[in-house]
Amino acid sequence: MSLRDLVKPKIRYNKPARTLSAKQVRAMKKRGYDAERELVGMMRSIGFDALRVPVSAPSNEPLPDIFAIKENTIVAFEIKCQIKYAYYKSDQISKLLNFLLIHKIYPKKYAVLAAKFKYKGWSFTVVDKLNAYTLKIGEGLTFKELQNFLKS
């Protein structure tokens, strides 16, 4: 569910929809922005050149939230900041994979789903297939495990 759906909810299955105030939407966006900035710092700390791609509106362009480059490796990240689980739609995965296809000069290309769970830390999953994914607390790789995976 996107932020737009929460602000202007669609009625589904005759159930009342959750709505958010403007203040709640700003808080959610800030939490996501802060998580992206934190991950950029983490990637830089292990020697990657990392950039946050600030795209404020939904786009058809294949842009990740963050991408990082080191030597012959490029990593594209889709980031969620949630409480219990993070859901990634297949079109978000498609954008990551298409972004990596554009960068032909890098022999090592990784699409990574990152989730920062409130009070629990980060989880990562490396994907290579076009599917929808869910990442829950305690699943996936830790940052240290991701770092080791990227070294190999």
Image (tube, grey):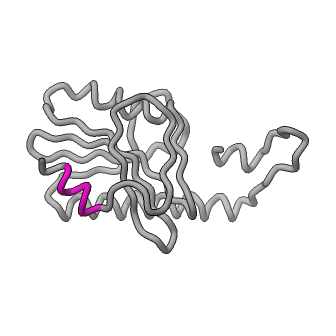
- In the rendered image, residue 92, in percent from the top left (x then y), is placed at 47, 35
At 44% across and 64% down in the image, what residue appears? 34
Vertically, is 109 above or below 125?
above
Vertically, is 83 above or below 61?
below
Looking at this view, name the residue that lies furthest to the bottom: 119
- In the rendered image, residue 113, in percent from the top left (x then y), is placed at 40, 47
At 55% across and 40% down in the image, what residue appears? 57
Q: Which residues are drawn in magenta? A: 143-149
- Left or right: where does residue 111 sit relative to residue 44? right
- Left or right: where does residue 65 sit relative to residue 18? left
- In the rendered image, residue 107, in percent from the top left (x then y), is placed at 13, 31
- Left or right: where does residue 49 sit relative to residue 65? left
**Residue 147 in magenta?**
yes
Image quadrant where residue 64 sits? top left
- The foreground one among 149 and 19 is 149
Looking at this view, name the residue that lies furthest to the right: 14
